[in-house]
Image (cartoon, rainbow, N blue to C red):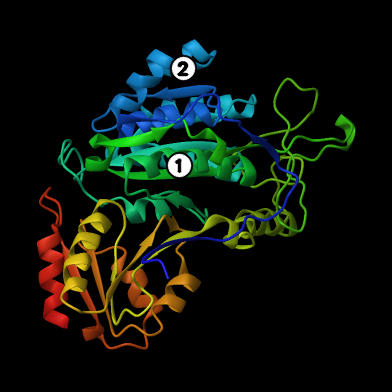
Amino acid sequence: MSAKKKQENQPDKTNSSVLVKEPSEKPKTVLMQGNEAVALAAMEAGLDFYAGYPITPSTEVAEVLADKLPQRGGTIIQMEDEIASICAVVGASLAGAKAMTATSGPGFSLMQEGIGYAKIAETPCVVVNVQRGGPSTGLPTKPSQGDMMQSRWGSHGDSPAIVLYPDSVKEIYELTIRAFNLSEKYRTCVVLLLDEVIGHMREAVSVPDISKYRVVNRLKPTVPPEWYKHYDEDQKYLSPVASYGEGYRFHVTGLSHDKYGFPTNKASEIATMTRRLKKKITQNIRDIIQIESFMMEDAKVAVFAAGIVARSAKSAINAVRKEGFKVGLLRPLTIWPFPDVAVQRMLKNVETVIVPEMNQGQIIHEIERLTKEKNDSDIKRIQRTDGELITPSEIYKKIKEVL
């Protein structure tokens, strides 16, 4: 069996508009920066509109798009701040555009109410957060994983999240397209979470291997305008969405609303709305979640890590494996919703879990929740908040301590 296996469940078969792109030229290998990959992949996914405010370490996303997006007929605008940026993105999406913004920790904090608005209004959009050290201004040019919980719980109220977390420039390219696909399919705001060092990293990437990607466009209504319900439902909690200017009448608000979008105080209608926001994620969990299993087939010790830390973990695991020890890695490509079932299944025969992360302990609590039958001594942590990476040697040392 392959040492490395990326597990992605088959997507649900819906009537989403799917465009399979044919390769326009022979794939070539180029040196690409992570933030550049976001911009290029977003355009391949059909990006029409970008609004943002410059902030380190995400600025290169806007710089590349400022040069290339207008050449493709798209629009980019620098807003006065991040609050205005997310509002512009939501407005553009309501008008039918595929829309995105990119920011970092402080700007991401400012966007939270707008992200919540996009979720309750069920308006597709993508927010890229290239994480940096915090809190507040913190360490603008240093890596951190301090926004993991904010990406899930930053917006007030019950607002289920889809958050993707790549570990390489190539995967940034792939997951940017996936972020747009999921946002369009499930009519929600999808967050692409990057580490600063991956956003600024340059790696050789084969592009444009477009034939392997599919681009999903939002479902469009097929009923007459007088029959249209902007928040209609089906068994998979997916629904067509009209855009402004297409002849369909609908209302959009941040208030609790009925199926036409008008504000309501009726308990039954409020319950229907909040249930739909939750279940369109939970009922399609197999389509949304991706997780990588690396040398886990016979592992007795598991490292659970995401993003750049997972790369350090792989290096440490390869070194320990050469010494004959059975150690593996679990890596979530989808960090939210958290891959509960997959983690529980793969940790079933593991004796010890090591959780390295560049924060004071966020994801480790999810592991503790899923392994509560184990003793505290079975879960080990490695944490750094000094702006430096967790190195392979640190993880190697911790692995050897528990063997």
Q: Is residue 264 above or below residue 216?
A: below
What amino acid is at disc 2?
Leu
Is 312 on the left-hand or right-hand side of 164?
Answer: left
* Residue at horizontal 49 percent and vertical 44 percent from the top: 190
Q: Is residue 258 above or below residue 49?
A: below
Query: How many neighbours does mark 1 have within 10 angstroms: few (below 14), some (14-19), or many (20 or more)?
Result: many
Per the image, label 1 sits on a secondary structure element best described as helix
Residue 246 position, x and y percent, is 76, 22
- From the image, state whether disc 2 or disc 1 is nearer to you: 1
Q: Disc 1 designates what residue? A: 174
Q: Disc 2 designates what residue? A: 69
Residue 113 position, x and y percent, is 45, 41
Is 179 on the left-hand or right-hand side of 262?
Answer: left
Q: Residue furthest front?
A: 26
Q: Is residue 213 visible?
A: no
Is 179 on the left-hand or right-hand side of 326?
Answer: right
Where on the picture, by quarter, is residue 336? bottom left
